[in-house]
Image (spheres, grey):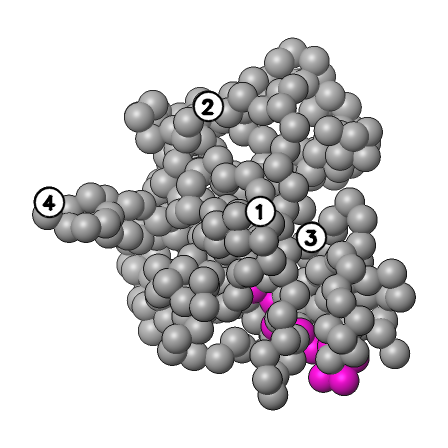
Amino acid sequence: MTVGDKTRALKTAARKHMEETGETSLQAAMQHVRREYEQGQHGDDGDQQERMGFEEAPYADEYEYRPRVTGTGYFIAWGVQELLGLGQVQQLVQHAEKDGQPDAPDPITCYLCDERIDVTREEVVHVGITLREVQQPGAPKPSELQFPVWTHDRCGHTRVWSWSQLTLARRRRNLPISTADLPPKQHRRGRTPIEDYYVFTMPENSPPVFYLQPGDDHRHGPIGFRADRLSDGLPALDLSRSEPRVLTEWSIAADRTGLLYIERQGTGRWYQPPTPWSPPPEWLAAAHYHGTAIFLTAPAGSVPTEKFDAGTSNLADLLGVGRNDLLFGAVMTVSGLA
């Protein structure tokens, strides 16, 4: 990890501390986090974020869908409406209005403090979702179950979680957990990370395609990758059934050296490689002509690495990945090529 990486990680932890405690000074929050690092309270469990440019999938913010019922506002984390649809999101809000009352026999509780949520006293309630894989007898692969995750605004904004991500968040807050639900330990110290893979292709009569695949496995497995991408605001994509959506809030910055970074409006840079990506000249020409590119991403190992090394990978490799809801992407603006 470089000095710049450490500074970014420190700032990220400090901002999270500000969200969780209400601290208003970034400098004070950074001093607090530094003390925690010195005391060994960060990093010992090996929970390093994957190297695919994201420090952590973002929480909901002011850009998100926020229906207001009576006096309570509801932040709906990115990806929740993508998974459930607007109708079920509205049902979740109605459920909160009913079971969030002080005298409700089956109250809703905050997953980050285990205390009940009283919607008559809360200005904002955060609504996320957790994804949990359960192996059914005789089934060829696990089924994905989805459960709503409620949190107080003071406890922390919510998101789409994998079950192990949510378990780890609870352990950090000294809440009861089952250790069997924690992700495996990681031992990356001293190990050279595997570089991320990327491929540029040009389908006929289409904007060019940019595929990015992490070199290292996600600590929380493919379902953790899925939860992170949904939290980022990237929709799942099945290329055998549908075309990528145009998402105007996403863009790819470029200059004459190549592609510089990917960003989302409202959250800043989402991914930045150590050096600019260098697509073939014809790819850049196509991106300049269309003004857009199709960005795709999937978990590590989705496309066999030997195909990257041989230069034989193509979109056909991603059809099965998309059918398993593990391919994400959209049509993004490419800026800076004019």
For label 2, the crowd category at 10 Å Cα-Cα, with few meaning under 14, some 14 to 19 and many 20 or more, is: few
For label 4, the crowd category at 10 Å Cα-Cα, with few meaning under 14, some 14 to 19 and many 20 or more, is: few
Q: Which mark is residue 271?
A: 3
Q: Are marks 3 and 4 in contact (CB under 8 Å)?
A: no
Magenta-colored span? 287-296
Residue depicted at x 10% and y 47%? 138
Q: CA distance from mark 1 to mark 4?
A: 32 Å
Q: Which mark is residue 305?
A: none
Question: What amino acid type is highlighted by mark number 1?
Answer: Pro
Q: Earlier in the sequence, mark 1 or mark 4?
A: 4
- Please tell me whether residue 316 belongs to the stretch shown in magenta: no
Q: Secondary structure at mark 3?
A: strand
Q: Say if residue 154 shows up in the picture.
A: no
The residue at which mark 4 appears reads as 137
**Up/down of 314 relative to 138, above or below:** below
Q: Secondary structure at mark 2?
A: loop
